[in-house]
Amino acid sequence: MNKKLRKIINKLKNKGKLSVREYEYLVKNRTEEAAKELKNHAFKIKTAVYGDKIFIRGLIEISNICKNDCYYCGIRHSNKNCGRYRLTAEDILACAEEGYALGFRTFVLQGGEDPYYTDSVLTDIIRKIKEKYPDCAVTLSLGERTYESYKALKAAGADRYLLRHETADKRHYKKLHPKEMTLKNRIACLKNLKKLGFQVGCGFMVGSPKQTERQIAKDLKFIEKFCPDMCGIGPFVPHKDTPFKDFPAGTAELTCYLLSIVRIICPKVLLPATTALGTIDTNGRQEGILSGANVVMPNLSPISVRKKYMLYDNKISTDEEAAENLKMLAERLDKINQKIAIDRGDVKGR
Ligand code: 5AD
């Protein structure tokens, strides 16, 4: 390994932070040897903080109706080929009931920015889940809302909120989103969520169209400074009905490399091995975990809607990523000496 790379890796391991230029160098000049070293180090940190436990989250995809038109996303407003659906409070509670019996103690309500889910609709759902399952955490992943709205959701009992920043570079953000959407508002939302006391998750796609190593470096710097409780990092995967249909997918190799770096920057972070990673590589999620990830989010949506929540082509939903096949997941994890935890799985030290 060259001297400069050696020095940067040592600094990352000792200090848990680098300059943007150093992150850029680390990404641009990565070697197999560097990746192995960071992977081993990240896995050691994950094990020191969370042991051999992997936290599971029951992912309930509540609606694929979205007012936004993100260029990468299969459920974007303009996609006329997307069969739309939304779940009612009853549907969602039925998912939670099934999930609880399976051992899930966190439910993630994720959906497009669907105006049907007003504060009163959502607070009603959150209260019902928390009343019935007081030992469970509720995570929301419902996009950008006002401070007042987030406040109402928190007051109703929501514990966590996922809102990927998508890219920390303003110009890149503009290339991925139409003009109504701004990085500024995204970041303002993340700060509001933090201020309100949510466990907050940010994150980005790896290999999204026109992404440069410099921009990835900025993502890492953002994560280092924002210090999220959760961080979703998965490869970009093209969707056939989007403007980005002809762009190549990101790689599992770079995704895992970045998972390791993020684990080293934020030792306690809740870091999922994402479905997108499992989609581009059958071994993706195991590799993600060995690279430092400690969360898996099996699909708990009603089977009838799963094929409709297609954020990208070929999104997997019927094998070990399906909540009802938790046993399969446990067996997969057993092969890498990891155990599923029946636990809320909160971030350490909070
Ligand atoms: N490929 C990979 N990830 C995607 N997402 C949306 N579309 C895609 C895609 N084509 C991710 C976004 C979003 C999350 C819910 O899914 O980062 O925040």
Image (cartoon, grey):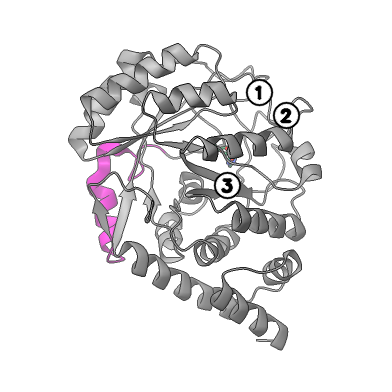
Residue carrying label 2: 181
Magenta span has 276?
no
- Which residue is the extreme one toward the left? 101
- Quadrant of the rendered image containing residue 148: top right
Magenta span has 333?
yes
In x, y percent, where is residue 246?
Answer: 72, 40
- Quadrant of the rendered image containing residue 238: top right
Foreground residue among 89 and 309: 89
Quarter of the figure with the N terminus: bottom right
Task: Give the residue type that dot 2 points to.
Answer: Met
- Quadrant of the rendered image containing residue 59: top left
Q: Are marks 1 and 2 in contact (CB under 8 Å)?
A: yes
Segment tinted magenta in the rendering: 317-338
* Gap in angstroms between the C-alphas marked 3 and 2: 17 Å
Callout 3 secondary element: strand
State yes or no: Cβ of the residue under disc 3 lies below 8 Å from any atom of ligand 1.
yes
Q: Residues within 10 Å of mark 3 (few under 14, many from 20)?
A: many
In this view, 203 is above or below 304: below
* Gap in angstroms between the C-alphas marked 3 and 1: 18 Å
Task: Say which of marks 1 and 2 sits in front.
Answer: 2
The answer to whether residue 51 is left or right of residue 313 is left
State yes or no: Cβ of the residue under disc 2 lies below 8 Å from any atom of ligand 1.
no
Residue carrying label 3: 203
Tell me which image quadrant ligand 1 sits in.
Answer: top right
Query: Is tag 3's residue or tag 2's residue first in the polypeptide sequence?
Result: 2
Foreground residue among 332 and 22: 22
Query: Is tag 1's residue or tag 2's residue first in the polypeptide sequence?
Result: 1
Task: Say which of marks 3 and 1 sits in front.
Answer: 3
Task: Give the residue type that dot 3 points to.
Answer: Gly
Task: Give the residue type that dot 1 points to.
Answer: Asn
In x, y percent, where is residue 157?
Answer: 36, 28
